[in-house]
Image (cartoon, rainbow, N blue to C red):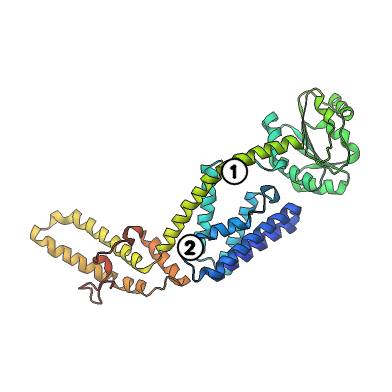
């Protein structure tokens, strides 16, 4: 178990670092840092998992949660990207290292399921807290869809690249990137399936675009009311949405006074992000309730990996089938034969289940191979271990001796 967790953590961290190296910039580096924090949390858990108690396992979620507390959503490439890296790490672990056993697989799947529940049953994921994506949401409120509208992004630095990616995901009619360094504009446009134009063609690009997003590092406005008015006269009718997410501003405030122009600045976008963040924070208690519920489920499953409950559930399962068959066919036998028939059935069950029961008794639940065996038995026979876990009265579910003619019990 310890080796599996450590190997998984290493693979996850590697996948995050690879993503950052692939050109995700500072956001990718932050995501890699988050993944490194998860790695540290898992490694710390791995050090103790061999002698883990219920309390140790219950703390695993809190350890990972604490390791992520210093990172905001804006610092990451996104939850979907983070989840993708985790899934890649898990897949690599299972396929290459052969270290993802039943316990780690169950833990990982439980975590993924918990995340899905949190997002579907609460509003923790509703409304972006990213300023860059808030720009997209603002534009979509005006146009509904961008499939018929050209989008112009001014700037190809870190912020410009991030907002350009979000707008590319919205599938505009065409995405144009203008940057003072033309090769960088070409590179970003190529990555996103758009087109690049040199800085000298800025006014032409303004005239053609229905949406303009400014994110350059210019110290003064690069779009003023005069240049925008010229662009409006050259273009057709319809509204123009301008979003200025630069600091200092790239678009002069007077541009917002022009007819048919909707101008949103960084303050407006941050206000939206803050409102969404506040709304999400109110959902935290609901999410924590879901997490607690799933932790309880996982721990209940983990505690079911004990020898006696599995034996009882296995024998109980076979006894249920035998009782059902006896009930179906009881009318075909005389009443005086019923007791002998039941005794024969009980003896047959004891003989059939003696060897599997003996093998299960020799399983060591604290060993990874033992866990795999107990999980396999539960899954093969669809055992309801909980139904037999607290059972204390000896019965046919408790075992049989070598001959199968009498019970050998558990005591």
Q: Helix, strand or loop at disc 1? A: helix
Mark 2 Cα-neighbour bin, 10 Å: few <14, some 14–19, many ≥20: few
Tell me: 43 left or right of 55.
right
- Answer with the quarter of the image where residue 277 lies: top right
Can you tell which mark lies on residue 328?
none
Q: Helix, strand or loop at disc 2? A: helix
| Camera sees residue 289 | yes
Q: Residue furthest right?
A: 200
Tell me: residue 102, above or below residue 123: below
Tell me: 188 left or right of 199.
left
Which residue in the protein does label 2 denote?
55
Tell me: 110 left or right of 360.
right
Spot occupied by residue 18 in the image (x, y as percentages of width and height) = 70, 60
Spot occupied by residue 321 in the image (x, y as percentages of width and height) = 26, 58
| Camera sees residue 146 | no
Mark 1 Cα-neighbour bin, 10 Å: few <14, some 14–19, many ≥20: some
- Answer with the quarter of the image where residue 215 lies: top right
Which residue in the protein does label 1 denote?
281
- Confirm or deny contact between disc 2 and disc 1 (CB under 8 A): no
């Amino acid at each position: 178990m310890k080796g599996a967790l450590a190997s998984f953590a290493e693979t996850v961290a590697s996948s995050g670092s690879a993503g950052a190296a692939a050109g995700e910039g500072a956001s990718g580096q932050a995501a890699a840092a988050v993944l490194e924090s998860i790695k540290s949390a898992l490694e710390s858990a791995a050090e103790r998992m061999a002698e883990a108690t219920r309390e140790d396992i219950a703390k695993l979620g809190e350890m990972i949660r604490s390791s992520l507390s210093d990172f905001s959503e804006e610092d990451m490439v996104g939850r979907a990207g983070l989840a993708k890296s985790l899934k890649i790490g898990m897949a690599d672990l299972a396929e290459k290292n052969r270290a993802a056993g039943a316990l780690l697989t169950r833990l990982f799947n439980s975590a993924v399921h918990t995340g899905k529940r949190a997002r579907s049953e609460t509003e923790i994921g509703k409304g972006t807290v990213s300023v860059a994506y808030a720009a997209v949401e603002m534009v979509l409120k005006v146009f509904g869809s961008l499939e018929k509208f050209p989008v112009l992004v001014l700037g190809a630095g870190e912020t410009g690249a991030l907002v350009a990616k979000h707008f590319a995901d919205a599938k505009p009619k065409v995405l144009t990137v203008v940057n003072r360094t033309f090769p960088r504009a070409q590179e970003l446009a190529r990555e996103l399936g758009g087109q690049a134009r040199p800085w000298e063609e800025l006014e032409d690009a303004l005239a053609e675009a229905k949406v303009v997003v400014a994110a350059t590092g210019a110290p003064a406005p690069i779009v003023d009311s005069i240049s925008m008015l010229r662009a409006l006269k050259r273009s057709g009718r319809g509204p123009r949405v301008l979003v200025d997410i630069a600091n200092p501003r790239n678009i002069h405030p007077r541009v917002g006074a022009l007819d048919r122009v909707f101008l949103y600045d960084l303050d407006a976008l941050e206000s939206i992000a803050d409102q969404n963040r506040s709304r999400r924070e109110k959902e935290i208690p609901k999410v924590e309730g879901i997490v607690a519920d799933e932790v309880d489920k996982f721990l209940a499953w983990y505690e079911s990996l004990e020898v006696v409950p599995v034996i009882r559930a296995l024998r109980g399962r076979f006894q249920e089938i035998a009782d059902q068959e006896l009930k179906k066919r009881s009318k075909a036998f005389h009443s005086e034969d019923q007791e002998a028939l039941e005794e024969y059935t009980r003896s047959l069950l004891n003989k059939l289940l003696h060897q599997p029961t003996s093998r299960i008794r020799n399983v060591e639940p604290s060993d990874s191979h033992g866990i795999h065996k107990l999980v396999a038995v539960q899954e093969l026979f669809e055992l309801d271990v909980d139904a037999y876990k607290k059972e204390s009265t000896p019965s046919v579910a408790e075992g049989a001796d070598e001959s199968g003619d009498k019970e050998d019990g558990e005591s």
